[in-house]
Amino acid sequence: MQFGELVKALAAVESTTQRSVMVKLLASLFKKALPEEIDKVIYLILGDLRPPWEGLELGVGEKLCLRALAKATGTSQAELESMYKKTGDIGEAARRALASSKRPGLLAFGSQKPLEVSEVYDALIKVARATGEGAQDMKIALLSSLFARSSPEEGKYIARFVVGKLRLGVADMTIIEALADAYGVRKEDLERAYHVYPDLGHLAKLVASGKPLDEVKVTPGVPVLPMLAQRLSSSSEILAKLGGAAICEYKYDGERAQIHISQSGVRIFSRRLEDITHAYPDVVKAVREAVSAREAILEGEIVAVDPDTGEMLPFQELMHRKRKHEVAAAMEMYPTVLYLFDIVYVDGEDLTNEPLIYRRVKLSEIVHESDKVQIAKWQMFDDPDTVDVFFHEAVSVGTEGLICKSPTSEYEMGARGWNWIKYKRDYKSEMIDTVDLVVVGAFYGRGKRAGLYGAFLLAAYDPSSDMFYTVCKVGSGFTDADLKKMYEILQPLKIPHRHPRVSSKMEADVWFVPQVVIEVIGAEITLSPLHTCCLGAVRPGVGLAVRFPRFTGRYRTDKGPEQATTVAEMLELYKRQKKVAQPE
Ligand SMILES: Nc1ncnc2c1ncn2[C@@H]1O[C@H](COP(=O)(O)OP(=O)(O)OP(=O)(O)O)[C@@H](O)[C@H]1O
């Protein structure tokens, strides 16, 4: 196909206001393409040389494009820049420059063979693949000879394409419809294939050469469209919707990761199927060590954790991974844990049609849990009250709530069905004041904190029973000096068992006589079945906990344990918290 033909179709697509006309225009263009070039036609229309998840980038900025144009047309760069500024469209600048060009040293346009789609595509691939030393000059040379051979109208689209501003508004679904129309295949079949193998160039080639779409299979290295969740706000509704029983999993607050293990190594894809492997070298390494499979596709959530305590941090802390040059530092300051919750494929076996409960078994067979790779915490329930208790536990330890799943459901690629239902809070609260809590136990530290305590179990005081009730485990906010000091002041208070005046569901590594009081602040006070403070006061079976607690740095030596924050004050603080609406 001549490139001019594609350009004519693009101009027509651009001028139409009707989506149905757009589909028709694309369909008639596709009909004219040969099977060996249809993929190139499609990639050019979509504005990416390869499916985006392959991560091939042209590496051409506006400056470079203008330099190539200057070289091809003999127009000065300053003039090109001012044309661009005036029109706001690099394509228009290219068109004008080519139209008025004297084409120095080259044949006049029209006296040479017209450009073919394949030639343009192949040249652009070369531009993309030029890397390393001399890459810039190479890219300019390749582009300028492409411009030199193109008509003004062709140059317009090439310029827009290379700087990533094609902006035709053609979406993947538009292409799917046009392909269905052009080749007489069912749109649903194409959609299904697309969920399994989201590469429209590849699929178009199959249909154009008359190959059946059911040959398209789940393939390690090629991301599948992720299964998504609906949302409901009560556990009874959720259980009813799921037929009475549900696998409930912690809903971790991090970045969704589709992890592919194949011959070519480990690759990680985001929720939007971008290749995010470069941001998580630590996850790649941990997966290699923890997963025993030659090939697999796993699904999980990458969560930032406090390097000293291993406790989960809010999602925002992952943002430090987004800039390439910051990844190494971010790995130190914000290490991650990968929580795996599904498996789509393992060693030649496509698991998408297997029930979740079976996939869960497979997952635990091939994953050997470590500090860095764990299986998402889950439990099966058929009673709304116990779901709620699990939900409060999940929130209090720093997750967003639960994802409740039908135990018998398949892995539905690309679907937001009712087999996965998220259960989050509508409101988040904000802790309005610090609290002074008593240290009743401690947990041994790891890594930098080895030999000291890594976290402490804290309690509030109840004057009516003269007992201490636990309310959080805190490891954040302590400097190295603080940790040493804590170890020293607690040493004489060590006892071989829980103090009789302490009520706790948690098992600490070390117990103390309740005496030391420290000041703590948290993100909020939540319900939690893990702690005994105000147990049953708000809901049966659950107490109160400080979520994301941290030491403020203040030792309340002025306070004895009986002057610590009381359980009644905790309840009051819980009730008086500011509620802020949770974004969807
Ligand atoms: N155990 C789990 N099972 C499935 N997803 C989980 C789990 N834990 C955390 N998640 C995350 O929760 C996301 C869905 O919920 P959420 O509402 O937070 O995300 P969203 O981007 O707003 O919605 P969605 O991804 O459904 O469009 C999943 O995409 C996944 O990243």
Image (cartoon, rainbow, N blue to C red):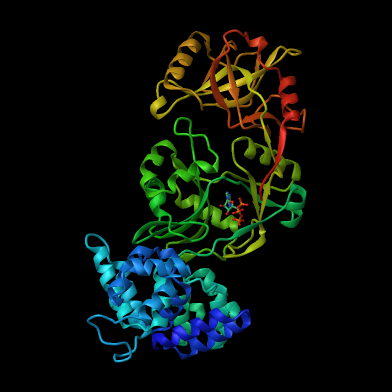
Specify whether residue 348 is in view. Answer: no
What residue is shown at x 59% (from left), y 64% (from top)? 412
Task: Give the quadrant of the N terminus.
Answer: bottom left
Left or right: 241 as drawn, with respect to 454: right
What residue is shown at x 42% (from left), y 82% (from top)? 153
Q: Nearer the viewer, residue 12 or 34?
A: 12
Q: Quadrant of residue 127?
A: bottom left
Q: Quadrant of residue 182?
A: bottom right
Vertical arrangement, residue 202 with respect to residue 434, above or below: below
Q: Position of residue 262 (x, y in %)?
A: 38, 61
Q: Position of residue 460 (x, y in %)?
A: 66, 19
What residue is shown at x 53% (from left), y 10% (from top)? 493
What residue is shown at x 75% (from left), y 24% (from top)? 572
Q: Position of residue 553 (x, y in %)?
A: 52, 19
Q: Nearer the viewer, residue 128 or 537?
A: 128
Q: Nearer the viewer, residue 77 or 69?
A: 77
Q: Position of residue 213 (x, y in %)?
A: 51, 80
Vertical arrangement, residue 436 with respect to residue 274, above or below: above
Q: Nearer the viewer, residue 147 or 94?
A: 94
Left or right: 473 as drawn, with respect to 452: right
Specify whether residue 382 is in view. Answer: yes
